[in-house]
Structures are given as structure tokens and as C-alpha cells.
Image: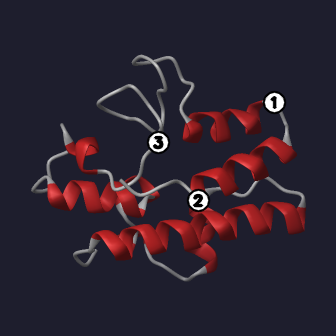
Amino acid sequence: MEKLTKEQAVSLHRKMWNWIAEETERTGEFIDKDDYFDAMGISDENCPTSLCYCCEYAMQQNGGENVGHCKYCPLDWESKCDEYMCLYKKFPRDNKGLFERWNFATITYDIEERIKFAREIANLEVR
């Protein structure tokens, strides 16, 4: 994948998550990140790290290294954790982060929660 600026990563992140929310609402189905890349015709080779433009940006800022890359995430996930802020809120492995809650809404079959969390993820503040 091409090198991303912070602005590009955030813009692409917002576009993807708004699309996920809109498609979930329109279809009444649980739309995932990979559905976005399929719908946009983006090949696997051109997909960002973890199917996340902000993760891709963070990895690029960290010299391609996975360990420690989250500190470069351009978004404020409102987490007290230093790593995987999208997954964890107060402490590692609590699974209370916004992305994890979006993910969990599939398990509980709560389409409205899924839409709500996708919109929240789309509109996270930049840090």
C-alpha cells in the first residue's frame, strides 16, 4: 500500500466507517470491514494493515514494525491503554474499546448498536 499522510489515513478511515454504517443501515445486515474493500474493488494486496487505514498509517510511522505502532494512531479512542486502544478502554484485554464493542454487537445480533458504533468510530477525534 502507498504511504499515507495523517490526513489521508483519517479521511479514508471516515469514508470506510461511514460506508459501513450506511450499508448496515440500508441492508439490515452485519457489514464488515472486508465488505468495504470488496465493494470498492480494492485487492488484498492493496488493503491496509488490519483492514484499517489508521493502523496502516501507524505501521508506516513505526517503520513497518507491528510492536509499538499504536502510539502513532492518529485517532483518539478515549482509552487509557498505550496499545490497541481500539480494543481496550481501561486496561489491556478488557475488550471495552469502541472497535471491540462494534465487533461484539455482531455476537449479540444488535444491528442498531453496530450502526451506532460504526458512526462513532467514523467520527473519532484526531489527536
Whether tag 2 and tag 3 are in contact, CB under 8 A, the answer is no
The CA span between labels 2 and 3 is 10 Å
Q: Nearer the viewer, mark 1 or mark 2?
A: 2
x 41%, y 35%: residue: 85
Give the mark nearer the N terminus: 3 vs 1: 3
Can you say whether 31 is above or below 110 in the image?
below
Q: Which residue is depicted at the point 72% across and 58% down?
A: 31
**Which amino acid, mark 2?**
Asn
In contact (CB < 8 Å): disc 1 and disc 2? no
Mark number displayed over residue 77? 3
Up-down relation of residue 77 to residue 32 (above or below): above
Label 2 residue SS = loop
Q: Position of residue 23 (x, y in %)?
A: 78, 68
Instruction: Single out the mark in the foreground, 3 or 1.
Output: 3
Please name the residue that numbered disc 2 is placed on. 123
Q: Which residue is mark 1?
A: 108
Q: Callout 1: few (<14), some (14-19), or many (20+) C-alpha neighbours within 10 Å? A: few
Which residue is at 68% across, 70% downward?
Answer: 19
Q: Amino acid at mark 3?
A: Trp
Nearer to me, 79 or 15:
79
Residue 48 is situated, as x and y percent measured from the top left of the image, at 37, 64
Which label number is shown at residue 56? none
- Which sits earlier in the primary sequence, circle 1 or circle 2? 1
